[in-house]
Amino acid sequence: MSLLSNLARLSLLPTRSLHQTIPNASSVFMKRQKKIDPEVAKQREARRRKRLEKDIRQMQKHSKKPKPVDELTLDVKSAKNIEERRRPPTQLTLEEIDERAIALKDYSRSRLALQREDDKWIRGAIESQRKALAELKKLSPELYTAAVQPAANDLPLTIHGPSLTPPIKNYEAPDGDYIDTTRNWAS
Amino acid sequence: MLSTTIRRYLSSSQSPQKWEIYASVVLSRAPLIAPPMSEIESKFHRLQMKEEEEKSLLSNYELKTKQDLKMVARREQLIREGKELSELDEEIGVTNAQKEDDWNRISEELNQKYRFDSLKTGVTEAENERNLMREMERKLVLIVKQRMGNESKGYETPWILPQIKHRDGETLRQTAERCIGELSSNDLSADISGNAPFGVFTHRYPKPISSKTGATGAKIFFFSANLTTSSQENSEFKVNESEDISDFKWVNQQEFWSTVPGTDYKKSMRFAFLE
């Protein structure tokens, strides 16, 4: 009798509330797992590991490679027949050599003159602006402080230089696709 | 603090000079086409190109031309010997000479269609100084004759850069922007460079005017501005003639120097020209 009552009390212990379900694996909606031969599984695992290692090695190899400079790389295709590409050597007469040397000197002199002119212009412009600002400061300090603020909206400034031929009026450009052939070196 | 304000008050009361502030805009049109090379430049260019060609290697195209010449020679030899030509047909294909003929034809057609040479000379009809397309290889600057608010008296200034009086509460750059805005009735977009003026000119009024206005003279501050390309394209540039401006024209540096009076005035804005 005492044993019975003891058992009854046992069944009322909180562990009883643990809810147990039937294992999911036996559900009809689940795919049945195929049984694999452990040998084959091992092999597969090894193969996958090998492939991953190879990929990692490749990636490491390429990650260290800097972006190539096209101007410095050798064009293999053209280098193959480089001997065919040589021009016959030219013999310059003494006059021609002189002419070239004189032309070069004249040209560099003209560039120097141009640079001097530019330099003079820049210095003059800065001085002129300094004077104008000093004048403005005397007249009105408020306008001066407004004038020396940086004009951030003006930048960046894009200027399309003059072309060799003037723009054609009412020109309709032919249709075409824009294909960006720039290689991407990021990542 | 108090002492400084008093001192400032005193100093301003001591000097009887009172200046009117004006903003003036050097509105310029950048050159549309590159100017031709100078003699030194073109000679150097010619010789340099020659030298570079001598030192270079043959390109693929030039190799093809050489190949073509060989093939043509072989073909003629075969014809002379009276043999079959069929074996060569595939090898020859389109020769470079044929290509060049095609290209020349196309370029000729384009030239006929658009007449680049006549475009280059630009507007020649009577050298219309109001046309924006004149003197394409030079930098042009807008000069005007202004009435300065005296329309009834028929007064107009000599040729000057467009200018406008500064109003209270705006910065000088805003004044310059207003000046451009009042120039033209149709959309005119120009970029002013910077907040600071690049030059100043002091103009002393003659006695009667200074006694009437109570100002010793005017300080004219110069700003430079460039016409944007979009406003050049609809080249029917017109200036508001009804209002303040009675006449306008586009001039290059030399013309500016010869038409605008006042050496000091011109000197104070000479840095707007760089060619």
Image (tube, coloured by chain):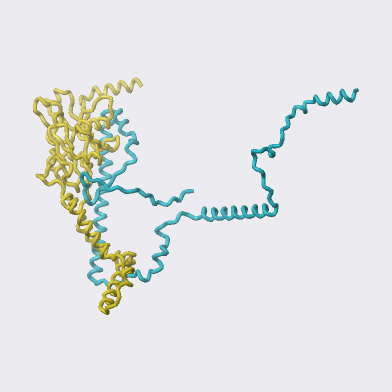
Q: Which chain is yellow?
A: B
Location of residue A40 in the rendering, given as x and y in whole percent from the top left corner = 67, 54
Q: Give A97 or B227, whichever is nearer the viewer.
A: B227
The correct choice, above or below, for A111 with respect to B28 in the image is below
Tell how many labels. 0
Instruction: Report if residue A131 is visible in the image.
Output: no
Location of residue A116 in the rendering, given as x and y in whole percent from the top left corner = 26, 51
Q: In the displayed image of the protein, which residue is found farthest to the bottom?
A: B81
Instruction: Report if residue A86 is visible in the image.
Output: yes
Q: In the displayed image of the protein, which residue is found farthest to the front?
A: A28
Location of residue B46 in the rendering, given as x and y in whole percent from the top left corner = 24, 62
Instruction: From the image, state the color of chain A.
Output: cyan
Q: Give B89 or B30, whichever is nearer the viewer.
A: B89
Q: Residue drawn 51% across and 55% down? A: A62
Q: Residue drawn 33% across and 21% down? A: B3
The correct choice, above or below, for A44 with respect to A10 in the image is below
Q: Give B147 or A59, whichever is nearer the viewer.
A: A59
Q: Seen in the image, is B101 located left or right of residue A63?
A: left
The correct choice, above or below, for A71 with respect to B8 in the image is below
Q: Quadrant of residue B167?
A: top left
Q: Quadrant of residue B81?
A: bottom left
Location of residue B121 in the rendering, given as x and y in whole percent from the top left corner = 15, 50
Q: Quadrant of the N terminus of chain A?
A: top right
